[in-house]
Image (cartoon, helix red, strand yellow):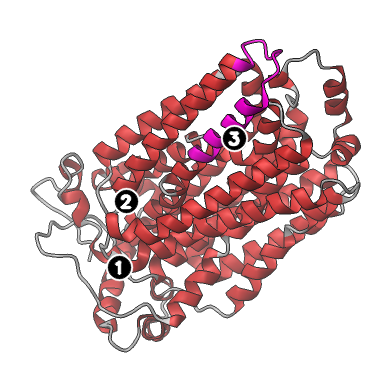
């Protein structure tokens, strides 16, 4: 909960004490369950796009292409209309995220999570009942509005509620529930794939995670930072007492929150303008762009969307492809569980490095096998053992993502921004992420058709670049309270030239 710019500090970061109370755990559990909304959608669309009854009703030209295919396995699903079914959600999410910053600051984190849950429920109902493409796309756009608002509010809620020593694990809970949503969607797709109405069940059940977060959010109080920003200091103190426990120094934490909010109010220009124009916010601006961009360029998002289609490309049958997606989702969930156990013990950068190296190896392995066995033309059939090897490398890549960029792509943006630009910074993070998700989901199948196996080498190159970037430019944030986060920039070998010019600095605390 920092505001303004940065005061150098050689002392230790403030520790307000307190314990991991039942109240903070349950609050963070409900907020993190917002990831179910995003995760279920990621997992459901690729499997539904592979179901024959769904294709026959909405995209019959894809079935005709498959029937008439001359053997180019890379291009079976290359359809801009089909990818628009997936990507339309992210256009709507992008629009919602552009206004979510102001809405979150004005209404609070809890109210925005309620709004996101209601929108997602409406979208799930409409897509499940769709009778034409227009109804399908409108339903997807309602889902997108829900994703845009929820992705803005839930990570901020988690970061502001969690005690600093457990912030990494609790904030990573958002990605854990996202992975749980992906796995649940893959299981639902596998169970309903043989029924002619199965696609309706898969799409309609998107309303279930919306109910979870909506009902849960009804019982949450807002975060202390949000309450102070809206002039409710007494409510903020009561919230701190409830979530920190009797042993915490809540008055000291509340004073620091109030100072940070007051510093934010003294700034007359807008948060986005401050990020773009003030020198002391240069590291925040760079990471607000770099983190969501690199998160998307790991390639795991499009693999999660289109895993069943990729597995069909390398020779799996329809049911085997859906089971491959289930296995991949289970690996993702398991790796995220491991991440929550070590993220606050070994720190963020160690996980970034290990996961990055692992993802590069996996992507290169996938590109090599597909290039050697399917070839450039895509006309060679891949033997089953090699198809299984592609699945293994896909799972290896997913595991590397699951204990690095998966959780940390949400943890880092939620904890590095001062309070006066926190909503704006998170809005920028969400907007860039959703914009790139739209671009990638709309272009991935066309890219696979044209780049063929080199598609995976392309993502491997980006993972190598981002791993080097993180090693050089991301300070370690493990265990540092949000109110003291400004000290990491002052001590960093590169960013210190921006946050401290030797003449003046504006207080974070």
The residue tagged 1 is 165
On screen, residue 96 versus residue 475, left or right, reads right
Seen as rendered, the residue at the extreme front is 385
Seen as rendered, the residue at the extreme top is 377
**Quarter residue 338 falls in:** bottom left
The local crowd at label 3, few if under 14, some if 14 to 19, many if 20 or more residues have their Cα within 10 Å, is: many
Distance from the alpha carbon under mark 2 to that under mark 3: 28 Å
The residue tagged 3 is 391
- What kind of element bears circle 2? helix
Distance from the alpha carbon under mark 1 to that under mark 2: 13 Å
The one of 298 and 320 positioned closer to us in this rendering: 320
Say which quadrant the N terminus sits in: bottom left
On screen, residue 88 versus residue 299, left or right, reads right
Q: Which comes sooner in the sequence, label 3 or label 1?
A: 1
The residue tagged 2 is 348
Which is more foreground, mark 2 or mark 3? 3
Q: Where is residue 201 in the image (x, y as percent from the top left)?
A: 82, 55
Q: Is residue 394 magenta?
A: yes
Identify whether 237 is placed above or below 4: below
On screen, residue 489 versus residue 408, left or right, reads left
Q: Where is residue 187 in the image (x, y as percent from the top left)?
A: 71, 53
């Amino acid at each position: 909960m920092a505001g303004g710019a940065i005061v150098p500090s050689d002392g230790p970061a403030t520790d307000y004490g307190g314990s991991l109370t039942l109240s903070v755990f349950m609050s963070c559990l409900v907020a993190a369950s917002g990831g179910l909304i995003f995760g279920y959608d990621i997992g459901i669309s690729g499997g539904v796009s592979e179901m024959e009854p769904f294709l026959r009703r909405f995209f019959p030209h894809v079935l005709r292409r498959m029937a008439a295919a001359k053997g180019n396995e890379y291009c079976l699903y290359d359809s801009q209309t089909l990818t628009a079914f997936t990507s339309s959600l992210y256009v709507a999410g992008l629009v919602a995220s552009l206004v979510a910053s102001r809405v979150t600051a004005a209404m609070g984190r809890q109210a925005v999570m309620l709004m996101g849950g209601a929108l997602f429920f409406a979208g799930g109902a409409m897509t499940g009942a769709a009778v034409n493409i227009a109804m399908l796309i409108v339903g997807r756009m309602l889902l997108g509005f829900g994703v845009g608002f929820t992705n803005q509010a839930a990570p901020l809620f988690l970061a502001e509620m969690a005690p600093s020593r457990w912030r990494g694990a609790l904030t990573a809970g958002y990605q854990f529930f996202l992975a749980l949503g992906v796995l649940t969607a893959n299981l639902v797709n596998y169970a309903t794939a043989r029924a002619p109405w199965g696609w309706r069940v898969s799409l309609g059940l998107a309303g279930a995670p919306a109910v979870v977060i909506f009902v849960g959010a009804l019982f949450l109080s807002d975060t202390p930072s949000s309450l102070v920003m809206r002039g409710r200091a007494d409510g903020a103190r009561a919230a701190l007492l409830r979530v920190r426990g009797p042993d915490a120094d809540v008055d000291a934490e509340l004073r620091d929150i109030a100072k940070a909010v007051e510093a934010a109010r003294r700034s007359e220009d807008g948060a986005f303008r401050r990020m773009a124009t003030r020198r002391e916010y240069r590291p925040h601006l760079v990471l607000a762009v770099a983190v969501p961009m690199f998160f998307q360029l790991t390639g795991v998002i499009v693999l999660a969307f289109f895993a069943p289609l990729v597995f069909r490309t390398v020779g799996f049958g329809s049911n085997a492809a859906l089971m491959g997606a289930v296995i991949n989702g289970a690996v993702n969930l398991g790796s995220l569980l491991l991440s929550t156990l070590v993220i606050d013990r070994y720190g963020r950068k160690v996980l970034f490095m290990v996961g990055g190296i692992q993802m590069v190896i996996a992507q290169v392995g996938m590109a090599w096998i597909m290039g050697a066995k399917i070839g450039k033309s895509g006309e060679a059939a891949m033997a089953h053992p090699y198809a299984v090897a592609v699945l293994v490398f896909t799972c290896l890549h997913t595991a590397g993502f699951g204990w690095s960029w998966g959780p940390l792509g949400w943890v880092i943006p939620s904890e590095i921004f001062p309070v006066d630009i926190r909503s704006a910074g998170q809005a920028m993070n969400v907007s860039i992420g959703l914009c790139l998700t739209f671009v990638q989901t709309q272009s991935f199948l066309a890219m696979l058709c044209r780049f063929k196996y080199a598609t995976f080498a392309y993502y491997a190159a980006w993972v190598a670049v981002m791993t080097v970037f993180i090693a050089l430019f991301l300070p370690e944030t493990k265990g540092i309270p949000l109110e003291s986060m400004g000290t990491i920039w002052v001590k960093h070998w590169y960013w210190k030239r921006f946050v401290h010019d030797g003449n003046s600095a504006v207080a974070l605390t």
